[in-house]
Image (cartoon, rainbow, N blue to C red):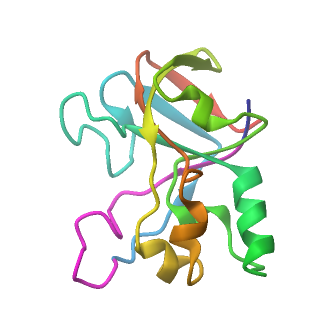
Amino acid sequence: MQILHLYISPEHNFFGHHGQPPGQAPMIEVDSVECIAGKGLTGDRFFDFKEDYKGQVTFFAHEEYERLCAQFQTANVPPSIFRRNIITRGVDLNTLIGREFEVQGVRFFGTQESAPCHWMNEAFAEGAEAAMKGQGGLRARILSNGVLRRT
């Protein structure tokens, strides 16, 4: 698995904003990020959100980003728009649901699809939520401490 982008954000833009306008907190691209077992990514909005949280980190396939950009003829929109933490290349993320896996020495457990929500229609393009169903990325728990770096 190649890591193309690493993102953290100190605040939620969509989570908990149903019926309200989205927040304005940027996704911050970093060269490396510290993973803390059972907690999340240092500096991210979901860090220590709640005990054993199923979405301590999120993965999203760059191949899916490229497919969506082509489908919606969207250019100049960075993959950070999907508010996932780790943008990957070369792995079918859905195959990691319900499995332990390791990336750069850090162990994870894939808990479920990071299902798209209605905000994707506003953030990316009308119809994005439906187009992403089944390919929204991967939510995971962090099982061991370590540092991830872009490769």
Side (left or right) of 68 relative to 70: left
Instruction: Relative to 79, say whether 76 is above or below.
Output: below
Q: Would you identify the image quadrant in which residue 103 lies?
A: top right
- Which residues are the magenta region? 4-22
Q: Which quadrant, please, contains the C terminus?
A: top right
Decide which of 19, 4 is in the foreground and name it: 19
Residue at horizontal 65%, vertical 43%?
31
Identify the residue at the far left of this view: 51
In which quadrant of the rendered view does residue 77 lie? bottom right
Q: In this view, does 79 lie above or below 137?
A: below
Secondary structure mainly formed by the magenta segment: loop
Q: Is residue 150 left or right of residue 7?
A: right
- For the N terminus, the quadrant is top right
Q: Is residue 11 magenta?
A: yes
Between residue 80 and residue 120, name the one nearer to us. 120
Q: In this view, does 35 lie above or below 15?
A: above
Q: In this view, does 19 lie to the left or right of 37?
A: left
Residue nearest the observer in this picture, 32 or 15 = 15
In the rendered image, residue 117, in percent from the top left (x then y), is placed at 41, 66
Q: Residue 67 placed where, x, y %?
A: 77, 63
- Number of numbered markers: 0
Q: Which of 106 and 132 is in front in this view?
A: 132
What residue lies at 48% left-to-right and 31% top-to-bottom? 34
Q: In this view, does 99 lie to the left or right of 124?
A: left
Residue 91 on image: x %, y %: 73, 33
Is 21 covered by the magenta stretch?
A: yes
